Amino acid sequence: MHILKIIRIDITEKIFSERKLKKSYESLKQLALHLKHSEANLHSIFDNSDTGFIVFDINKYVVTFNTLAQEFVLRLLNKFLEPDTNLSSYFLEEYDMTQLNAGFDCAVNGKKYVYDICMNLHDGTEYWLNQKFFPIFSANNTVIGILNEITDITEQKLFEKEREKITEDLIQRNNDLEQFTYIVSHNLRSPVANIKGFNDILNTVELKDTEKNEMLNGINISVNKLDNVIQDLNQILQVKHNVNEKKEEVKFSDMVKTIKSSIQQIIDKDGVVIKYDFSETDEMLTLKSYMYSIFYNLISNSIKYRRPDADPIIEIQSKKDNNKIILSFKDNGLGIDLDKKRNQIFGLYKRFHTHTDGKGVGLYMTKTQVETLGGRISVNSEVNKGTEFIIEFVI
Amino acid sequence: MEKLNFLLIDDDPFSNKISQTLIQSAFGKVEIKTFTEPEKGLDYIAKCDELKADTNSRSILLLDINMPHMNGWELLNEYEKLDEERQQALNIFILSSSVDQQDIIKARENKHVIDFISKPLSKQCLINSISKID
């Protein structure tokens, strides 16, 4: 009886604990299922994100990554991402790791690090990435890993560049328009005012015959001047529409030779020396007529504004720098006081020397042509020492 | 009537011819000095003894704006550095072909300038302007 009693008690407890066990087993199963679900959810977020993720341990070994990160690495480094491989194994020895290392160091020390980087694809196209490095903390707040977030920002960067270019273009056009207002205001208006003035005098003031003729002569010359200004304007406006001409390979040395022979008489008379060095680059795909006009204007300017006490020496040189062709035209002439005149030097109808005839159109045209060809022109000058024009073309 | 002296500074000889003819037509034989180079005009203003305050004569400068080397504004900046007596002796008008509103405003705001005259000068305009001198 006694024994039986004991057994009965034991079974009761066993059943209870079995029930308990079953219950906790069920809840564990439920929990595992939950975990599986939530892991699946996380994974689908991880893999379908438009950000690439790579998790590294603190020694820069890959722990895990998502599909997009795999795509980035394959496209940019031509390698497959694999767990347990070191970061450095993905890069060639000559690759500059400064920023990557800085990102890791920062994250290992518990801080976030962000930068944009431009990489070149095999076909030479630019590929922009935004790189972020975050520390991963354990429960007791020590860094146990590094999360690297990679975002493709190429489109955004190209858009920014495009926008900058448009802004620059608009500023340029605005300046052009202001210049035109100025011309209308001054250079068209001044011969008109003279014609009007002479005409008023002829109608209201009693004049001798000689004086009358003087007034008529004034009208005559002013009319011609007005016509010249209108023709200049026409020429300038045409430059801006002529870009459709075909580009061809232009040889700088040939161009200088042609110009030299076309002004041979002046060269002989004024003892002009033209030196040139196109050893670094002698050819460029461009609009021949513009290039000719740019060379011609700068050379003839150097001769026109020579120093009376020195034979003009003109040195022309070409240089190649990455994707740029840089042309330099240097003379030993009168020079221009840039402290006072820098803003006016390429302006229309701006003149700095009055001893020779000149309309103040040449440098304006040169600048317009350089810019139409996608280049930039700048100037260095010192009074009585000489002037140097530098033209940069991106190729 | 008091004596009038005219000073013309303009790089355009035609404009000077028009002004000269009209001044003579309006005031008869008065003294007119003409400079096509602003530097020389400024030099004259700085050195000429007749340009000191004289109750019996008035000196009037017709100054162009748009000139090479030194424009009208630059000349006025230099003028400001001259001694007071000289500055009080000269009555300055801007005579310009400009129709740019900025130039007109700038001229009227300049304390040395009495008024802006738009080219071409006319007899009526000349007489009106002279009457503005106090």
Image (spheres, coloured by chain):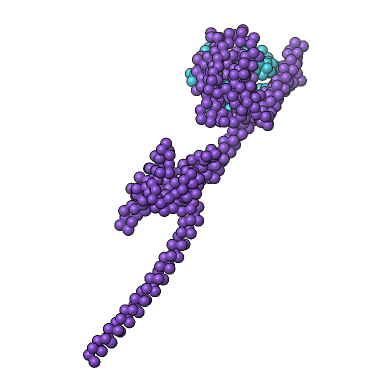
Chain colours: A purple, B cyan
Q: In this orientation, which residue lies closer to the viewer: A318 or A71?
A: A71
Which residue is most to the bottom?
A1
Q: Is residue A62 above or below residue A265?
A: below
Q: Position of residue B82 (x, y in %)?
A: 49, 18
- Residue displayed at 42% across by 36% down: A94
Q: Is residue A168 above or below residue A288?
A: below
Residue A103, image x and y in percent?
A: 39, 45
Residue lying at the far left in this picture: please name it.
A2
Position in image of residue A13 (x %, y %): 29, 82
| Residue A279 spot, x, y in % from top left | 54, 20
On the image, which quarter does residue A174 sit in?
Answer: top right
The answer to whether residue A102 shows anywhere in this view is yes
Residue A86, placed above or below residue A15? above
A96 vs A245, nearest the viewer? A96
* Relative side of A188 to A3, left or right: right
Image quarter (top left, top right, bottom left or bottom right) of the N terminus of chain A: bottom left
Residue at 46% x, 62% y: name it: A40
Foreground pick, A19 / A392: A19
- At 50% from the left and 39% from the top, the residue drawn is A120
In the rendered view of the protein, which quadrant contains the C terminus of chain A? Answer: top right
Please give the name of the residue rendered at 60% of the width and 14% of the height, measured from the top-left corner: A304
Q: Is residue B101 visible in the rendered structure shown here?
A: no
The one nearer the camera, B95 or A260, is A260
